[in-house]
Amino acid sequence: MMKTVYQYLRLCRFPTVFTALPDILMGFLLTHTALEPLSKVIPLLFASAGLYLAGMVFNDYFDVAQDTQERSQRPIPSGAVSRQSAFIFGSVLMLGGLLCAWLASMASLLVALMLAAAVLLYDGPMKRTPLGPLFMGSCRFLNVILGASAAGIRFGSAWQQPQLWIAACMGLYIVGVTLFARRESGTSSKLSLGVALLVTHVGLLGLAAYIMDWTTSLGMLLGAGGVEKPWTVLLLLGAITFTIDRNALNALLDPQPRHVQKTVGLMLLSVIMLDAMLIYFKLGPSGMPYAIGTAALMAPAFLMKKVIPLT
């Protein structure tokens, strides 16, 4: 029984769900001053988890031919989980996620439907096309918007600033991460890794522009944060970026799978810290407990990745 559960956890890459939940907390707190009402927060968290994990399952479902050749130890090609069982598992996760979104609000359900469509399009026909990374980035974008979808009764309430800008920056960051991971099972091109890293930096620069209010000079008002000294948050963003770059440099110098996969894992885990940082910036000192709680999601993700790889 436990072996079966373990294989399904491997199939959905369960530790990665802890990088999706912070998006919901951050998106929600961009439109609220507290995680209330819980009757909306909790369904949104389960909705995000269901859709994200479903995406991981369908990724393996559609990639079974490639995995058979390159990653034969994965649950489906190894025979630990049948392809039919994987389809059923992924479908249950996705439908469960949509149901939870509906419990939050009709606006949340509409965003969740868009997210589900983006997930299936990426996993299916778009993954190996030049547009693949953009579709993956759109999944992250919509996940943040899903968190903000409880902003009001109307569907358009979530599609306001600053959540639109922040969601776009996080989406662009994930576009870069996806490009970085594209050939992680083999030797990657140094040029492609460099371009991917540059794209992640554009996304991070967008977050810096929000923190320091550089967008105002462009005529884009995103609203002020609750921190008196924004440069302190900018320093934190710099520390996160430095940690990513230090590992990425190893991959650029020696683009072997072990270096690339380690960097990709760090990039994904860094999403948790970025979300926690943005929560603190938006709410200021009153948001510190939420920021710490969000950052604490690093712990289960880090511990579980030792037995269930993120990539």
Image: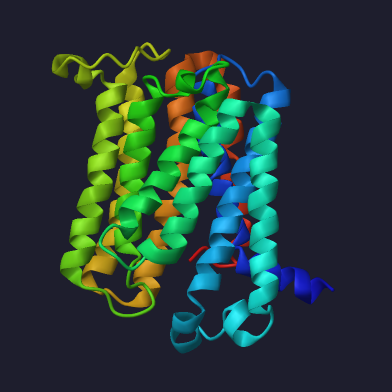
- Looking at the image, residue 270 sits to the left or right of residue 201; the answer is right
- Looking at the image, residue 234 sits to the left or right of residue 192; the answer is right
Q: Position of residue 42 (x, y in %)?
A: 70, 32
State the image quarter where residue 160 is shown: top left
The image's colouring method is rainbow
Q: How many marks?
A: 0
Q: Is residue 127 above or below residue 142?
A: below
Q: Position of residue 62 (x, y in %)?
A: 50, 72
State the image quarter where residue 282 is shown: top left
- Looking at the image, residue 133 sits to the left or right of residue 310; the answer is left
Q: Is residue 17 above or below residue 8?
A: above
Q: Position of residue 93 (x, y in %)?
A: 67, 54
Q: Is residue 210 above or below residue 204?
A: above
Picture residue at 48% right of the left edge, 42% below the top: 114
Picture residue at 36% right of the left edge, 62% below the top: 126
Q: Nearer the viewer, residue 249 or 168?
A: 168
Q: Position of residue 183 (x, y in %)?
A: 32, 73
Q: Is residue 15 above or below residue 44?
A: below
Picture residue at 58% right of the left edge, 16% below the top: 153
Whether residue 207 appears in this view of the structure is yes
Q: Residue furthest bottom?
A: 69
Q: Quadrant of the N terminus?
A: bottom right
Whether residue 247 appears in this view of the structure is no
